[in-house]
Each structure stands twice: as C-alpha cells, then as structure tokens.
Image: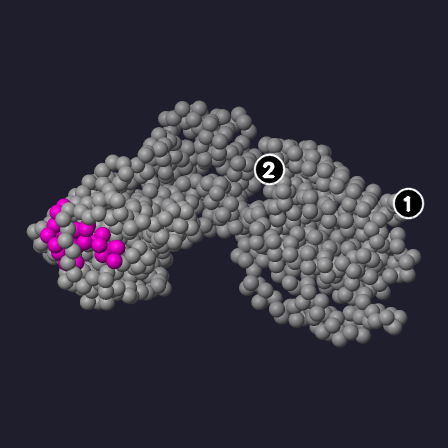
Amino acid sequence: MLLTRSGALLLITALCIACLGILSIYSSTLQKEGDFWELTYKRQIFWVLLGIIFFMLFSNFNYRRFWDATYFLYAATLILLLLVVALGAVRLGAQRWLKVAWFNIQPSEAAKLAIVVFLARYYSTKPAEALSLSVARMGIVRSILIPLAFVIIPVGMIVDQPDLGSGLIIFFIFLIMLYLSGVRLSYITGFLLMCLAMLPLVWHSLRGYQKDRLLVFLNPNIDPLGAGYTIIQSKIAIGSGGIFGKGWLSGTQSQLRFLPESHTDFIFATFAEEWGLLGAGVLLFLYYLLIKQGLNIAARTSDGFGRLLALGISCMFGIQIFTNVAMNLGLAPVVGVPLYLMSYGGSSVTITFISLGILANIDKKRSVF
Amino acid sequence: MRQKITLIAIACIFVLLFSGVVNLVCIQGKRLRYLSEKNCVRLLPQMGSRGRILDRNGLVIAGNRLSYDVMVLPQEQQETEELLEKVSGVLGEGVGGLRKAFREQFVSSSIPVAVASNIDVKKAIALEELKDELSGVMIQPHPLRDYPYGRLACHVLGYLNEIDHWRLTKLADYGYKTKDLVGFGGIEEKYDYYLRQEEGGVSFEVDHRGRFVRVLGFRPPRDGKDIQLTLDVRVQEIAEEMLGGRIGSVILMDPYDGQIIAMVNSPGFDPEVFVKKGGSAPLRRILNDPDAPLLNRAISGVYPPASVFKVIVAAAGLENKKIGYSTTFPCGGGMQIGNRRFSCWDVHEPQNVFWALVHSCDVFFYRTGLLLGPEAIHDFALKFGLSKSTSIELPYEAAGNVPHPLKRKITQFRKWYDGDTANFSIGQGELLVTPLQIARVMAVFANGGKLVNPYVVSSIAGKQVSRARQKASPVPVQEEYLNHIRQALKAVVSSPAGTGTAVAGVEIPVAGKTGTAQVSRGQSHAWFAGFFPYTKPRFVICVFLENGGSGHFAAALARQIIEKMIAEGLV
C-alpha cells in the first residue's frame, strides 16, 4: 500500500491549503503586467505537483536512513549555505538564493529540516545497554552546549545572508527540541537566561535594516515608507475583508498593489482580504489539523528518533506559520519568512512536502521497534 | 507530559492568531474598511539634499538648488483629468504632456504623481495660491544638483543619472532602488555612499476629496555628507581656459604629498544636461561624440609617453652603472639595429646623458637602453609607478602597460628583438601610460626621490581623510643621480638648444621634459611634464595633447598656464 490513512490525511490537508494558495497567488499577480507575473501561479502549480511526487517518494523511504545520513545532511547544508555566500544571487536586498540552472533554491529552507533531523538523532542516541533515553542524565555540556555549537554555525550563516527570520526560526526549533527531548528544565531555564544576557551583543551585530525592522514592529509609524507601510497595508487588507471577504479576485488592497510581497510573505493578508474572517478561520484550522496530525504521529511512535523527528517537523511548521501569520497581523516584526504551502516559492513548497512525506513514513514504520 | 503541553501551546497559538484576525475584522474593521474603500492613505516622499562637493578653499563646485515639482494625488479618472487641465492652464503647457507624465510616473494610487518637474518659482507660487480650487495638487520643493561653475572639473565630479540595471544589482544591498539618482564617474560615483541623501516622507490620511485629514507617520529626510576636494577652483579655471577646445588633459599636482590641484580634460561635458529632464538631444550628443567627452583622459586614457620616458631610462642607466656622467655616444642622426635603421629626430653632436636629455637625443637612449636591456628598464619603470594604477580616488583608472620580453612571450607568443628595446627606451612601442602616472614620475624629480600617491579628496563631512592615506615611498635611485637629471630638466627649458624653450623666459625657473609620441594614425601626441618653481617646487604640471603635434605645443600651453598663474598670484 502506498499510503496509510494518516498519510492520506496529511496529503489531502496539505493539498487543500496549497490550492487556496494557488488561488491567492493567481489573484495577487493578476493585475501585474509581464510574462514573469503571468506565469507565477503556473509555476506554483508545477511546484505543488513536484511536491506530491516528493511526498510519495519520502513516505515510502525508510526514515531510519536519515539516522545514518544525519552528518552527511548536515555537511551538505553547510556547503549549500557557503555556496550562497560565495555565489548567491542578490535579490530584494538579501542573498538567500542559489541559482541552479533556471531556478533559484533557498538553502535556508532545507537547513531547517536538516537541523531537525540532526537534533532528533542527537537526542535519541542511547548506549546499547540502556533501556531509556539518556538525555535526562546528560550534563549541561552534552545536553545543550554541544548541540548548540552545531546549530549556531548554520544559524550564523543564515543570519549573515541576511535572513534574520529563518535564523531565529531555527533557533526556536532548537529551544523546543530541547524541551521535547527531555533536557532538564533547570538547564533550559539557565540557557534562556544566558541568551537574554547576550541580547545586547546580538543587537549590535545586526545589520541596520534588521534593527529598523524590529523597531518598526514596535512602532510602524516610524517608517511609513518601508516595513511600516507594509504592516499598515496588511492590516488594512485583513481588516477590510470583513466576515465573508470581498470575494476572490476582488481584494482591493492586494489587487491595486498597495500591499507589497502580496504573493509571498504577505499572502495571508491577500487571502484574508478576499475570503474574510471565515476563510482565514478555515485556513488556520487546516494548518492546525496538519500540525495536530504530526503530533499524533509522534505520540503513536515508539522509536525515539522517529518521535523526536515527528515532533520537530510539527513544531517547525507551528513556529513558521505562527511567525508569518503574526507578521501579517502586525503582531510580529516583518522578518521575511514564507507561509508554508501558501506562499509562492519552490524551495519552501518542496521542503514542506518532503517533511510531510517523512511524517507519513514515520507513522508507517512505527511497528519496527 | 511535555508533548501534551506542546500540543496545548500550539492550540493556544492558533486561537491567538484567530483572535488576531477577529480583532482586525470586527473591532478595528470599521476604520480599516474605511481606509481601504477611500484609499485614504497617501505617501509623500521628501528628499534630503545630496552632499556638496567643495574645492580646497570651500567654494562649492557641485551644490544643490531647490526645484519645484507639481504633484497630483491620484483620484477618480475624471477628477484627475480636470485637475490636469487646470494645472496646464497655469503652467501654460499642453495638457497632453501632463497626461503622458501622469501615466508614466504613476506608481500606486497611494503615492502622488509628479506631472511636471523643475517648474518656475513664479508658477509654483501661482499654483500654491490656487490651492483651494485645486485640491489634490501639491507643490513639492526638492533639491536638485547645481553646478555654480558649469562644466568646471566635470570629469573629476562625474554626473548624476538614474541608476542602471548593472549598478542596481550591485547596490541593492545598500538600499538603492530603481529610479534613484546615483553618481556616474568621478567623485559622484566613488563616494556616492557618502554623498547620498536619505529619503524621508510623510504618510497621511486624506478624505474622499483628497484633502488632508491627519498625519499618520513621518520620517525626516537626511542630507548627504559634503566632500572637500584638493582642487583649487582658480587654478582649475586657468587650466581649462588655456586648454580650450583642444583634446587632451592638464594635471597640476603638489609634488610633495600628491594633492591634485587641477585636473582638466577636454572635451568636457555639461553635467547639468543630466539633471534637466526632457530634451535628450544634448545627452545623445555627449554619448555619441567620437571624442568621448565623458572620458577622464588624465586617468583613464593610455598613451605612449615618448621622450618623457627618457628620464626613467637615464635614471636606470646611472643607477645600474651602465652609463656615467661623462659617457658619450655619437648621434649621427640614427643607428643600425638588426636590419633596421632607427633614426634620431635631429642630428646631434656626440653628447653625455645631461645634454642628451636636454636635446632629447634618441640615439643616446637607444644605446643606453641596449646596454640596460628591456628587463632592467621594465623594472625601473615599475619603480616609478608605471603599469599600475595610482589608486587615486576616482573610478575607472587605467593601469597602462610596461612591456617585458617574458610577458610578450607568454601572452603574444612573440619574440623580443633589440629593435623593441630601442623603441622601449624612447617611450614608444607597447609602453602605455596615463597622464597622471607621468605627473607622478615628474614629482619624483621635483621632491628628491619620493613616489607620491596622488589624491583628490581631502575631507568627508569635515573629517580629514588624507591623513589615513599611504605615505610616499622612496624610489631606489641615488639622490645624486636624480639631482643630475633634475638639473638637465632645468636646462631643457633654459638652454637655447633645449626642447622646452617654449617655457623659457617665464619669471620663475621651470624644469621639465617634452615628448612627441608618434602614433600610427594622425598627428603625434604632445607631452610636457615638469615642475615649478625649480628651487622649491610647489607644482608638478603635466600637459598632454592628443594628436596635438610636437611636444613644443604642449610646452607652449604649459607656459601660458604658468604665466597666468603667476599673474594671478597663485604661485
């Protein structure tokens, strides 16, 4: 059998969201002229179809092989990130893309998944004779500092790209994995306090525009032309949608080009304007189902690696979706992270489907142990 | 346990997000819907002024003046049409042009559109007075580049133009956007980052008739930083006047620390042409001119230095002990090298290095060059700073070329002959230099053996930047030899048989060397490079005339410049 029941459920939910995404991309690029825009939604359809193939592949690919390939995946990610620095294409003020043939890949998306795999393996390693996982008995060095060293290298490279949003998201994934893998709470608290103490240092190392964006979040009116403008327009778009929305293809904010990045980072606002509170509620509910499904799979799995992997992937979804939607609502700074399955972009769509495929496979293989 | 908490936390997050949407739709919904329906948010960008460029005495070479733009707030089609008609009535321009400008400049319905730029002050006031009638029309003052001295020093300044695709890809990281004005060439390009102003603006709410209701946000614009140059406008003016319409370039430099006092190129261009919008004919004329008026010949043009190069060969010969003060070679009007006869430009008596420099005897230097060998000449040329850029703070500086037998073998697969050495010794053949490099060579003789690093920017935003520059490095030639050549350079001008007699008779003693570079097509290039006053030099001068004939003409031009400078009390 190609798919289990839970796998089919994951795929169907994801495809529902992806369809809504394609509709919104079509709507938001409709008014823009030029071949590039006319083809955008078609390319997204292509990416989703490719995603389905990836989903099928990975849901039938034994996820335990990732255990063996962890360090290889980690090294490959680092190399990709290095390549971005060396020869990435400069776009929208940031060097996040790697040009391969006719498309650009964004390695920071792959890096998130690689880090999840890496941490899942790290925290599920146990000595042969032990019956339970050893994380709870680890000291602070082995439970936090060593994995931190592995996480901080790609995070540093991503923040330097500069892509503050993805860097922060990986860091939050790390925190949640710490929590879920059973590291002692006292260590985690200590670590968080240390991070807080480091904040002023981090602030100094940020680039000017990154500081601006964080400040603009606190008060959008200090930058009415840049990021603040986007927040204001995004709020207007969502708020003016009303309960039932203005209807597909009739959103004035996104159609009339008030809203920048309306097909990528701010697609939630585009969607909410046209489909209203009801549509937004349904969309959020679909996302919730997807994540809930992932957490259920984790709960059903007895293999430590599989459990952590499923948890990590679900949390990665949760954090990223939260960050993006909160940014659309003006509740979080504009940091430039895509909304999984909705935003236009090949890297993010394929990585999402691969992650979902892994989830489906974990559920299939749970009888191994 | 922890998994359960996570599940609950994620559920909470989604509840939070949903309540965020509910908040925007239900609680703030009314106001947001109003803003959306009326398209009530307007953006009005405000420009700071670009940093000024000053001369060494603080005179403004490139400054700013206020220009007035007519901005129209986008409204319903018909209302906009009426507005444009009224505006065209006041401006006395056809409504068609305004309509076209409106269509072209339209970005989004939240941003006012500039339909006419750079209008007369009187018309601006007239429009401003009709404000009640013309709601939705704004007059926006905005600073424009202004050149009080016209085309003076245009090559050093560069010009401003709309950013092109290549520069945009390079500069997007630094916050540059399409349609930004950026510097092209010269200081404007090199120091664009400092000169650049920061855009500010206000966003405000307007009512359904486009009338101002209240300010939503404001960011003050910031002015760019001023840059002070080492140029002296008075000297620059004299040099430009004297060079006139001839193609070529003149450089005046401080021999001790490399400050560029004047850098003139001809033909030049009027940077104002790029500022004024409309009327692309003069622009096209500049871009299509075969004489390349945008080219800064002083640093980007490479030419054979001809006889000026003999000073380096003489220094190399003396330093390498291939010749002494008393070594004499007969001239005889030419000599046989291989199967070709290399002639001198004249027939001279047998003479030593001093008189060979004074008379610019080619045969003497053929023989010295053959004794030295091309490698030694190449090495000395490099020690005098040739074959690499002088690292002056102007973009597109050329490095020139100094030939070497090995280099030729590797790159062109051709053998080096003695004839090539002979040509090399008199500064012909593949040897190519920029006028600035020659000025630098001459400075070595003027200041007693230091290779200075030329520079043109003295301070940015009041901060001295020249101090941080590299110190002049000594050239490894004994001072005694340099002095000997220095005396010969004086005799070039003062001796009746010297090649630089055109400069003789000026009130102050001048030293220098002429050069006549033969070119494959057209007249020779004329060179004169020297320094003055002889005893305590304050200026190095390098005059270069492209296809200007014999070096005599360059020397004559140098004389005119020096005399005028003396007359104005600048020396």
Q: Residue at x 61, y 69 (%)?
A: A198
Q: Residues within 10 Å of mark 2 (few under 14, many from 20)?
A: some
Query: Which residue matches tag 1?
Result: A1
Q: Are marks 2 and 1 on the same chain?
A: yes
Name the residue at the front extreme: B339
Alpha-carbon neighbours of circle 1 within 10 Å: few (<14), some, or many (≥20)?
Answer: few
User: x and y percent of residue B456 in the render?
Assistant: 31, 55
Q: What type is the residue that disc 2 sits on?
A: Arg
Residue placed most toward the observer, A108 or A174: A108
Colour setting? one colour
Q: What residue range appears in magenta?
A: B346-371
Quadrant of image for the C terminus of chain B: bottom left
Q: Report the magenta stretch's main SS.
A: helix
Q: Whole-Å distance between the Cαs marked 2 and 1?
A: 47 Å
Drawn side of residue A247 relative to residue B360, left or right: right
Q: Tally the numbered discs.
A: 2
Instruction: Name the subunit of mark 1.
Output: A
| Viewer-proximal residue among A47 and B380 | B380
The structure residue drawn at horizontal position 49% and vertical position 26%, both measured from the top left corner, is: B81
Q: Find residue B394 and report its horizontal and vertical position in percent.
A: 36, 51
Q: Which mark is residue A257?
A: 2
